[in-house]
Amino acid sequence: MEAALSRLSFVDLDARGHDNGMGLVSTFTEEECFQSTMRSMHMWATHAKFVQQEATVENPEQTVRGTKAARGGAWDVMTRFIAICERLKLPFRLEYLCDVDPKSGQMAVTFSVPTASMMPGSDFVGGQWVDMRAQRAGRAASYALRLAGLLAQAAFTTGARVTSVDVTGRLGSLSGQPVLSLGFDRSPFQMGVQPAYVSGRFDDAAQDNDPAAIVQMLQPARHALRFGADRGLMPVEPLPKALVRQHVPLWKDKRELPDDIKTLVRADYAYELDVMHDDCVVKGPEIWDIVNQNEDSPVTAMFEVESALMQIESTEKDHGDRKPLYCEHPLMRLLMVNVEGKATDRYWKLPDAVYNAHGALSRLNRELGERDKAVAQSEEMMRLAPTTARGAIELSLDYTDVGEDYAGSADALIRGLKTALMPIDVGFMYYRLGLLAVS
């Protein structure tokens, strides 16, 4: 459905071309709609020319708050690649990941490959629609291979230091099975493959159901690839990971932050920004396991949750003047500049289980009709996690579910909206405010 809607957007663009951008033409025929769809899937020369021109464009992300990344370094290369991918106008959703080792010149790209069912199932020939569902798998393979080459071009465009690119496609999404893995070297690609893209050789619709011909045009230096009887892509073992760069997990990254960044995020070292690593003796999900296992006895659940809290407190080390902080998402950690406090405040990562325990105790007390106790737990959630919306939502429910205090509930939501980040949280909180307005 999404693929069909994406292709309709190209029909809209063509319609706008008929009347100075209005898109209100009433004589757009079925054949013209089909031609718009076909053009959207055969714009490889246009894409390649766009990618080519990006080689001379300044990277707006190279400098962040006065700190400039090295030209050709990992940050510069990856943000340049992302900027290209985000601006490509494709008929299917593009999900992708990239990594680069500037020292060795190696880059790796993983992207999502459209499934056969996403491809158009019919062509408009001689004024009639013709069933082409039998060619869907082959067409999906040809599209994926063309896209793989385009992404390789984008990778090489990011800088001269990138000398080798491995592109791996996964079916449907980044978590799907790998179905193609192609390796390209810079000189052969730029001398042979890139000119073929720019000249329009990859735009030929006659190759839509001939993925093997696309492979011949791509001339990969190495590959893991096989086709089924329907010419569709089959699962493969990706090329061996070529990157040698050793990634340091954020929670182990001891690099000192620039002074301006320190003030912005209220942290001195990179590892202080981690909100995901959790080595607590009690894991976050275990708290909800306790609640679920004792759903018929809220009092027992509360006792066990409080016992878990005591266990955690007995093993927690001394953090000095640092304040506890929980963030549900990494981006929420970057919002601390908007939270009441001092620029010199520093934090330690609160275990997930502690935050979940206060959330569980709020719900359990609410279930028992103990509003004041529930409110106290929700307020503690907001204190420990000022940029996470869940505490404000729980507090809002405390006021409505026990005592029907709609004004208190609305105030809690308004407090939460000041720092709410995730669209699903913001939407839910406005939904709740809407309900309160009519109550």
Image (spheres, helix red, strand yellow):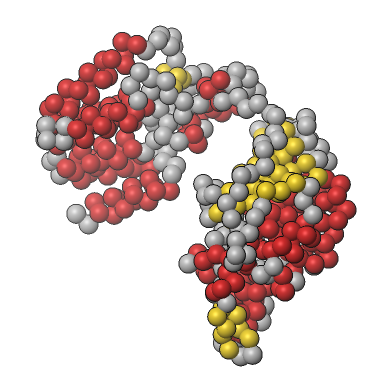
Residue 217 appears at what percent x and percent y? 79, 60
Q: Quadrant of residue 68?
A: top right
Residue 313 appears at what percent x and percent y? 31, 14
Q: Is residue 423 left or right of residue 143?
A: left
Q: Residue at x 52, y 49 (%)?
A: 176
Name above or below for residue 430 compared with residue 128: above
Residue 273 appears at what percent x and percent y? 52, 26
> For the view shown, which residue lies furthest in the bottom direction?
127
Name above or below for residue 22 compared with residue 186: below
The residue lying toward the viewer, choosing from 45 and 328, is 45
Q: Is residue 351 left or right of residue 296?
A: right
Name above or below for residue 436 compared with residue 314: below
Q: Residue at x 88, y 53 (%)?
A: 191
Q: Is residue 247 left or right of residue 51?
A: left
Q: Residue at x 42, y 31 (%)?
A: 327
Is residue 108 among what the camera can see?
yes
Name above or below for residue 329 compared with residue 136: above
The residue lying toward the viewer, choosing from 258 and 128, is 128
Task: Quarter of the image for the C terminus: give it.
Answer: bottom left
Q: Is residue 396 left or right of residue 40?
A: left
Q: Quadrant of residue 164?
A: top right
Residue 385 appears at what percent x and percent y? 38, 29
